[in-house]
Image (spheres, rainbow, N blue to C red):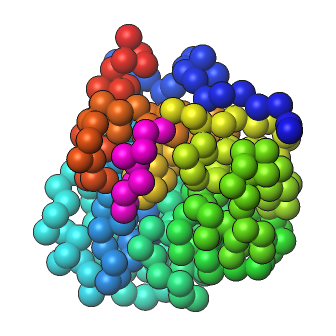
Amino acid sequence: MSTYESNAPSLWQPLLPKPDASSHKYSRGYVLIYGGYPTTGAARLAAFAAARTGAGITAIAVPEIALPIYASQLLSIMAKPYSTATQLEELITDKRVGAFLIGPGAGVTEETRHSAMTMLDTKKPVVMDADALTVFAAQADLLKTSISGPCVLTPHDGEFERLFGIAPGRQLHQRIAQTLLATAQTGAVVLLKGAQTVIAAPDGRLIVNEHAPATLATAGAGDVLAGIITSLLAQGMPALEAAATGCWIHSEAARMFGLGLIAEDIPEYIPAVLEQLMA
């Protein structure tokens, strides 16, 4: 089995973004999330997590038909409506955006696929999760030709199988080998979610997160994780370290909460985890 490092703060703590007296909302990172419809909760969970992780601005690009749903439940997080493909492209190509997230609740549609390609074309950091992975089913090679900036793919087992055509094994050594093949095939950091989450970079670096409690097996937890990682990327962390840090923060927040955890609880505990890490 390939040698890996067990995820721990010592691997990435010096790279954690820290606000100082000169910080302003744009210098702290602008996260733009693709907001789906009619499934709207996933993008909102990701947005709350991104904001709690320190992004100075968090916005969701939402179809105009869904604006009342998003706007009625968002305050500091901005809902940016669009009604045409051109308007959506203008939101994506805004030079102030620091990192993108696409996939949670996005829908398996041509618009999701086109939007993902537009985000990748900016060469800015992109996190691809959920439906944004499924729209490229069996087309991992196409992703490799499209990825030219930092990119993190965050599949669960089903999404991994659809994208790469391989069902992840049950044993850790199998999952490590498969994740290493996936990162080589795409040129992205690949984070294969599970009880032991495997995080691999194209240069062969390998981290396994063994810190997650069983309570994270709950709907929406993956959306929260994607939001945390996107926030860290927008604040300047490298892709592998952002993925590993996000995994650890996500796990520790769930541990702090304990039994009865639902996805909405996790963002509320992120500040306490950050406080510990920066103490």
Where is residue 71 shown, x and y percent of the image? 19, 69
Where is residue 117 shown, x and y percent of the image? 65, 73
Q: Which of the 4 image quarters holds residue 162?
A: bottom right
**Who's the residue at 40% across and 48% down the image?**
216
**Who's the residue at 60% across and 43% down the image?**
196
Count of labels in the image: 0
Name above or below for residue 265 compared with residue 16: below
How would you classify the magenta stretch by its main secondary structure?
loop
Q: Which of the 4 image quarters holds residue 273?
A: top left
Q: Which of the 4 image quarters holds residue 109?
A: bottom right
What residue span does the magenta drawing correspond to? Answer: 212-221
Name above or below for residue 124 compared with residue 144: above
On the question of residue 32 being in view, the answer is no
Where is residue 243 shown, x and y percent of the image? 59, 42
On the question of residue 37 being in view, the answer is yes
Q: Does residue 29 appear to the left or right of 25 in the view shown?
A: right
- Closer to us: 261 or 37: 261
Q: Farthest residue to the left: give it.
A: 72
Name above or below for residue 197 compared with residue 253: below
**Who's the residue at 45% across and 76% down the image?**
106
Q: Does residue 119 appear to the left or right of 145 in the view shown?
A: left
Task: Residue 263: say if magenta.
Answer: no
Name above or below for residue 44 compared with residue 265: below
Q: Does residue 244 appear to the left or right of 61 in the view shown?
A: right
- Closer to us: 276 or 6: 6
Q: Farthest residue to the front: give it.
A: 171
- Closer to us: 50 or 77: 50
Q: Does residue 10 appear to the left or right of 105 in the view shown?
A: right
**Who's the residue at 35% across and 33% down the image?**
255
Q: Farthest residue to the top: give it.
A: 279
